[in-house]
Amino acid sequence: MISIDPRSGPHRIPLAQRPSRELWAKASELTEMAEAARTMHARTSLETLAARFAALAAQRELAEGPEEVTHDPPTVRRQGGR
């Protein structure tokens, strides 16, 4: 599990410095969490975060170039209407 800790410290890596594979992993994790959410509000919030991480991962892949991409991106369900 990838942790996003708002506190600073030596273990904290900003999203802007994370490789696309980590961002895809977080998007996938958030999608799974959304599927298990108990309320519609939680589900929608998690789906929104998953879509944002997936978009960031896709942008990062373009910046990294094809030699850095070592996997097929996971399918992340986008929130309806966005």
Image (cartoon, rainbow, N blue to C red):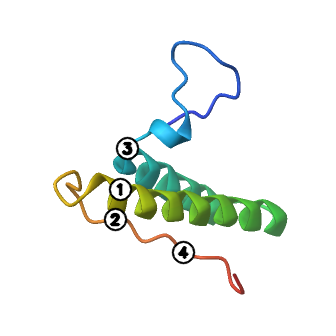
Residue displayed at 52% across by 12% down: 10
* Front tag of 4 and 3: 3
- Taking depth in this image into account, of 5 and 34 the one nearest to the observer is 5
* Disc 1 to disc 3, C-alpha distance: 10 Å
Residue displayed at 78% across by 59% down: 42
Q: Position of residue 61 (x, y in %)?
A: 34, 58
Residue named by callout 1: 63
* Front tag of 3 and 2: 3
Residue displayed at 55% across by 23% down: 12
* Front tag of 1 and 3: 1
Q: Look at the numbered disc 4 and give the secondary structure of its residue.
A: loop
Q: Position of residue 32 (x, y in %)?
A: 54, 59
* Disc 4 to disc 1, C-alpha distance: 23 Å
* Disc 2 to disc 4, C-alpha distance: 12 Å
Q: Are marks 2 and 1 in contact (CB under 8 Å)?
A: no
Horizontal side of residue 46 vs 18, given as left or right: right
Residue 77 circle label: 4
Q: Amino acid at mark 2?
A: Pro
Q: Position of residue 64 (x, y in %)?
A: 30, 52
* Disc 3 to disc 2, C-alpha distance: 13 Å
N-terminal of the two: label 1 or label 3? 3
Q: Look at the numbered disc 3 and give the secondary structure of its residue.
A: loop
Q: Amino acid at mark 1?
A: Ala
Farthest bottom residue in view: 81
Residue named by callout 2: 73
Farthest left residue in view: 67
* Disc 2 to disc 1, C-alpha distance: 15 Å
Residue named by callout 3: 19
Q: Amino acid at mark 3?
A: Pro
* Front tag of 2 and 1: 1
